[in-house]
Amino acid sequence: MIWKHEDRPKSTIQCTSGKTIQIITAKNKPDLGKTTAPIFADLLGPCARPWEIPPGDEIKSPVIALSSAPGLMPIFDELIGYYLEGWLSFEKIWAVSLAELEGMSEKDPLGFRHRLVWGLLYPVDFPASNLLWPETASNSLEEAATALSKSFSEIGDKLDLALIEVEPGGRVGLNEPGTAWEPGWITTGLSQELRTSLAAKSGGNDSSVPSRGMTAGIGLLSGARNVLVACTGSDGGNVLRQALLDEPGVHMPLSFLQEAQGECIIIMDQEAANQLHRA
């Protein structure tokens, strides 16, 4: 298959830190999924197309971190389409959680795991055994974080790919402004603003959202070999502008992109691009 994204405008931006990041502009918000999905598929490498691997060759399975942010669902829909058309396989991919709330099981619709499993992993050939998820329903957050860190260390030394969306305030997973940039998976409290936001997305109320959760630390994400960022709307563009052009630090978790060790690619719609590139 020839991925259909080569006609999208491309540019680069130099961050305050000196790091150069690639920018790809989708035609509009609905086009964001069609633009991002093929890049994601390419970054998965040959394990996503195992039929192309010569017999006897051993290829390391990539480890990816996924967010279940609503803005990523169009990307997941495109990836599911690739799988159904026979262009992509997930059976040799490992996935780890970007975040989870305290006390959540796979069946709880408020949990990130529920949305991710039903939004992408269940419809494709992703083995349940290859999903590393914090068991916050049956363990304390601290126990879940320790167990997940141990499981991750057994399959790789760093993430091969992280897929995230630009969130309000530059939040990344459950890393809110002011959260220390820690490696591994960390436990954290949720601000009232975040609890209200999560409740609104799930149709519940603030009291239904736990006050604590666990998340991939910024130190872990900044060490990823590849980071793919989706950004939509003028608000998203404003947040991204601050993250890339202001001084990086804990006040803006997304500013870790300026210090990321691997390659970063940002895919945005035109509204976001207008804000990022404004004079």
Image (cartoon, helix red, strand yellow):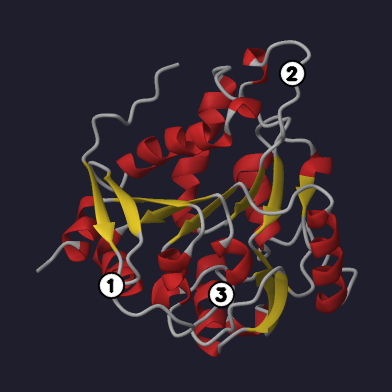
| Residue 130 in view | yes
Identity of the amino acid at label 3? Ala
The residue at which mark 3 appears reads as 199
The residue at which mark 1 appears reads as 245
Give whichever of discs 1 and 2 has the lower sequence position.
Answer: 2
Mark 1 or mark 2, which is nearer to you? Answer: 2
Residue shown at 44%/85% (left/top)? Answer: 251
Taking the image as shown, residue 30 lies to the left or right of residue 264, namely left
Q: Where 237 sits versus 248, above or below?
A: above
Residue furthest out toward the left = 279
Taking the image as shown, residue 82 lies to the left or right of residue 59, namely left
Q: Are marks 1 and 3 in contact (CB under 8 Å)?
A: no
Residue shown at 30%/72% (left/top)? Answer: 16
User: In whole angstroms, how far apart are the C-alphas of marks 1 and 3?
Assistant: 31 Å
The residue at which mark 2 appears reads as 57
Kind of element beneath mark 3? helix
How crowded pointer 1 is (Cα within 10 Å; few <14, some 14-19, many 20+) is rated as some
Kind of element beneath mark 2? loop
